[in-house]
């Protein structure tokens, strides 16, 4: 097994290379006149589309219903995670079989953050 610090060092080095590559790419795009024209036109179209979406949402749809659904979905997602973690700690099998007989298993991941 590889050393945690070595892998972390390699990860940081590759992230730095990717950051540099992206900066060079962004600079090359900024120097391309046609790209800048298209970007400006695209932004205008996005704003127009957003205005139309807002208009339809406010006039024809129930915005509060959508917001309520979003909150319920977020709460249920957190509850599923909590239940699955508790089952894992109790060393029980964790799986969900939906109405289409599709088996779902949890995916756990560890994320490191700076202290």
Image (tube, rainbow, N blue to C red):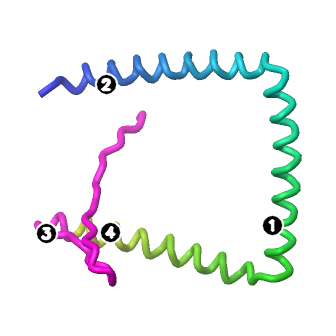
Magenta stretch in the rendered image = 87-115
* Residue for point 82% across, 59% down: 50
Question: Which quadrant of the structure image shows residue 8?
Answer: top left
Residues tagged 3 and 4 counted as in contact (Cβ below 8 A): no
Identify the element where label 4 is drawn. Answer: helix
In which quarter of the view is residue 25 placed? top right
Q: Is residue 108 above or below residue 31?
A: below
Disc 3 from disc 2: Cα separation: 31 Å
Neighbourhood count class around disc 3 (C-alpha, 10 Å): few under 14, some 14–19, many 20 upward: few
Mark 4 vs mark 1, CA separation in Å: 35 Å
Specify whether 26 is left or right of 87. Answer: right
The residue carrying mark 4 is 82
Outermost residue on the front side: it is 34
**Frontmost residue, 17 versus 4:** 17
Name the secondary structure under disc 2. Answer: helix
Q: Distance between the Cα atoms at labels 2 and 1?
A: 44 Å
Residue identifier under label 1:
53
Q: Is residue 86 left or right of residue 55?
A: left
Marker disc for residue 103: none
The residue that label 2 is drawn on is 8
Q: Which residue is mark 3?
A: 90
Mark 1 / mark 3, whichever is N-terminal: 1
Residue at 48%, 18% (x, y): give it: 16
Q: CA distance from mark 3 to mark 4?
A: 12 Å
| Magenta stretch, overall SS | loop
Label whose residue precedes the other's in the sequence (2 or 4): 2
Q: Tell me if residue 77 is in the magenta stretch.
A: no
């Amino acid at each position: 097994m590889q050393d945690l610090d070595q892998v972390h060092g390699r990860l940081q080095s590759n992230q730095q290379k990717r950051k540099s590559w992206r900066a060079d790419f962004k600079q090359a795009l900024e120097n391309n006149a046609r790209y800048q024209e298209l970007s400006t036109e695209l932004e205008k179209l996005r704003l127009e589309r957003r205005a139309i979406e807002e208009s339809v949402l406010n006039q024809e749809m129930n915005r509060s219903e959508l917001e309520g659904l979003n909150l319920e979905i977020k709460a249920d997602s957190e509850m599923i995670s909590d239940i699955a973690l508790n089952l894992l700690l109790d060393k029980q099998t964790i799986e969900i079989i939906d109405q289409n007989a599709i088996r779902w298993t949890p995916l756990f991941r560890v994320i490191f953050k700076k202290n």
